[in-house]
Image: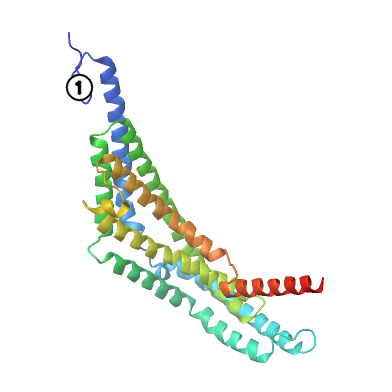
Amino acid sequence: MDTGGGGDHPFFLNIPGQIKKAIDDWFRGLVKDALNPTMELVGKTVLATPQVATQRRVAQLWQVALGIADAMLVLFVIGGGVIVMSHETVQTRHALKDILPRVALAAPAVNASLALCGQLITIANALSAGLLGAGVDPGGAADRLSGFVVAAISSGGIFLIFLGLACAVVAVILLVVYIVRAALIVLLVCAAPLTLLCHALPQTDGLARLWWRALLAALGIQVAQALVLTAAVNVFLTPDGRGALGLSATGGLVDLLVVLCLLWILIRIPFWAKDLAFSVRPSMVTRAAKTYVIAKVARAGALAA
């Protein structure tokens, strides 16, 4: 008696085939249940930043930091006066013309930092929307990515199902990274008065510059992710877009790999931004000047020897 019935729909008495189908269906359902709500959240959240500057709790925390910063401004002014008085005695780098503009910049920046952060968030959201405006809707793009994965695993074997599960896991990681980025922006906005106060003195200016780099990097992440998603939807995920990747083959495996690589790039963008923000390296001109000086010194030493 034939107990076959095919791989997709095994005959009732084909116990091994029935077990295999049950396992495949269970994993397939797991991927769909995890992927659909996750990709829906990705489309609604990842490519935008909430306008935290207008939220009442954030404004209250900012007010507390502002009160501390305004009180400490007097100490910074006194410290600047001490630096000016020590000019040409203890130190020769910072005179009144160096300190006075810093204090004049720090005082209004501290008090206007909440509005400034709100404007920067608005600009970042506008840039993301502008990049996505070329026929790409974040929710529609996420649904399209989810559709690629679901279509690939619906007719594929266990290997394709595990690739789909990897896509779902990476999408969850993308959401976690977004939550971390949003929380970081809230902390940066609340700490803005204290950090921008550091512009008042040359010795503390580095902390204020670090705040600028961190905030701009956190807001720039969504702009870069919007650019990547636009390129993916308009180029790589189109019927003839495989040629841009040098791929001549089509099918579920290729679709899953393209989606997985796209999600991996979206996850890596925040880490690249972090490296740019916190890895302060000398400029190319500075490195070239140092190399030139070292070469000159080495040559002079060789000639002297």
Screen quadrant of the C terminus:
bottom right
Seen at 43% across and 77% down, the residue is: 115
Q: Is 271 left or right of 103, judged from the image as shown?
A: left
Screen quadrant of the N terminus:
top left
Q: Amino acid at mark 1?
A: Gly
Q: Answer above or below: position of 241 versus 103.
A: above
Seen at 63% across and 78% down, the residue is: 72
> Foreground residue, 302 or 131?
302
- Quarter of the image where one finds residue 30: top left
Q: Which residue is mark 1?
A: 6
Q: Is 9 left or right of 186, judged from the image as shown?
A: left
Q: Quick check: can you spot residue 81?
A: yes
User: Number of labelled discs?
Assistant: 1
Q: Residues within 10 Å of mark 1 (few under 14, many from 20)?
A: few
Residue 160 image point, x, y percent: 31, 36
Residue 4 image point, x, y percent: 20, 16
Seen at 38% across and 69% down, the residue is: 124
